[in-house]
């Protein structure tokens, strides 16, 4: 990070930033602009300070799309279900798609992702845990690679399910607020 002046703009992709306050990764995709610390630095460095930030091009994750996913996941019970919010770079909006299950049961789901157009990207990967609570399994940690938001819903037999969300950055995970952590906003930041 420059100590004086501004950092050159980052068009897309990933770059590392060495700053006075740590080592940061900066990730830029059509739907995400993120800078997050990945390591502390144990010495005083002659660089500028970096600031953590996560910004989605689509704004907030619409609760209506998450509620549509929950409805579909409840219909799949007692089995798990999987889907995604697909980002359309032409219009800057998300749409829900439910994945076709290849192998499914109450404790797992393997699925096929639909073919996407050139201007579409998986931004938010979603799956359910049926009647179990929302948590990140070891399989989730292995599967949640690349760059995307991941969400899991559990306790679907209750009126208000449990939820967990995180940002996955090539194996680095950052917890995000779940849809009901800031009642009654109507959308997730």
Image (spheres, helix red, strand yellow):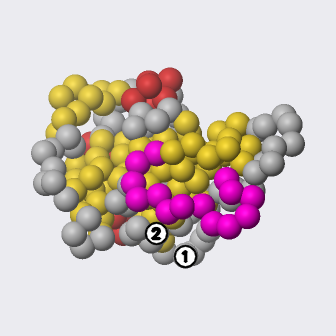
Residue 114 place in picture, x, y as percent = 15, 44
What is the crowding at mark 2: few (fewer than 14 residues within 10 Å), some, or many (at least 20)?
few
Secondary structure beneath label 1 = loop
Residue 60's label in the rendered image is 2
Q: Residue at x 44, y 71 (%)?
A: 59
- Residue at point 74% right, 43% down? 22
Q: Earlier in the sequence, mark 2 or mark 1?
A: 2
| Depth check, front residue: 1 or 81 | 1
Q: Secondary structure at mark 2?
A: loop
**Magenta span covers which residues?**
1-14
In the image, taking residue 52 as reference, residue 143 lies left or right, namely left
User: Does the magenta portion include 5?
Assistant: yes
Residue 80 visible somewhere in the drawing: yes
Q: Is residue 34 left or right of residue 113?
A: right
Instruction: Check if mark 2's residue and mark 1's residue have beta carbons within 8 Å.
Output: yes
Residue at numbered disc 1:
185
161 or 164, nearer to the observer? 164
Q: Nearer the viewer, residue 44 or 176?
A: 44
Give the image location of residue 61, x and y in percent.
43, 65
The spot of residue 11 in percent (x, y) is 41, 59
Which residue corresponds to the image point at 57% horizontal and 43% vertical from the top-left? Answer: 16
Viewer-closest of 84 and 35: 35
């Amino acid at each position: 990070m420059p100590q004086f002046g501004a950092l050159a703009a980052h068009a897309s992709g990933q770059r590392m930033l060495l700053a006075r306050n740590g080592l940061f990764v900066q990730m830029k995709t059509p739907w995400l602009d993120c800078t997050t610390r990945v390591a502390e630095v144990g010495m005083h460095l002659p660089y500028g300070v970096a600031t953590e930030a996560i910004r989605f091009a689509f704004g907030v994750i619409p609760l209506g799309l998450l509620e549509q996913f929950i409805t579909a996941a409840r219909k799949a019970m007692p089995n798990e279900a999987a889907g995604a919010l697909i980002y359309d770079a032409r219009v800057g909006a998300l749409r829900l798609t439910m994945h076709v299950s290849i192998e499914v049961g109450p404790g797992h789901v393997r699925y096929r992702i639909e073919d996407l157009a050139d201007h579409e990207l998986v931004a938010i990967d979603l799956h359910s845990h049926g009647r179990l609570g929302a948590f990140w399994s070891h399989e989730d940690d292995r599967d949640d690679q690349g760059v995307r938001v991941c969400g899991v819903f559990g306790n679907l037999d209750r009126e208000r399910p449990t939820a967990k969300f995180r940002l996955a950055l090539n194996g680095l995970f950052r917890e995000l607020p779940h849809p009901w952590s800031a009642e009654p906003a109507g959308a997730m930041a």
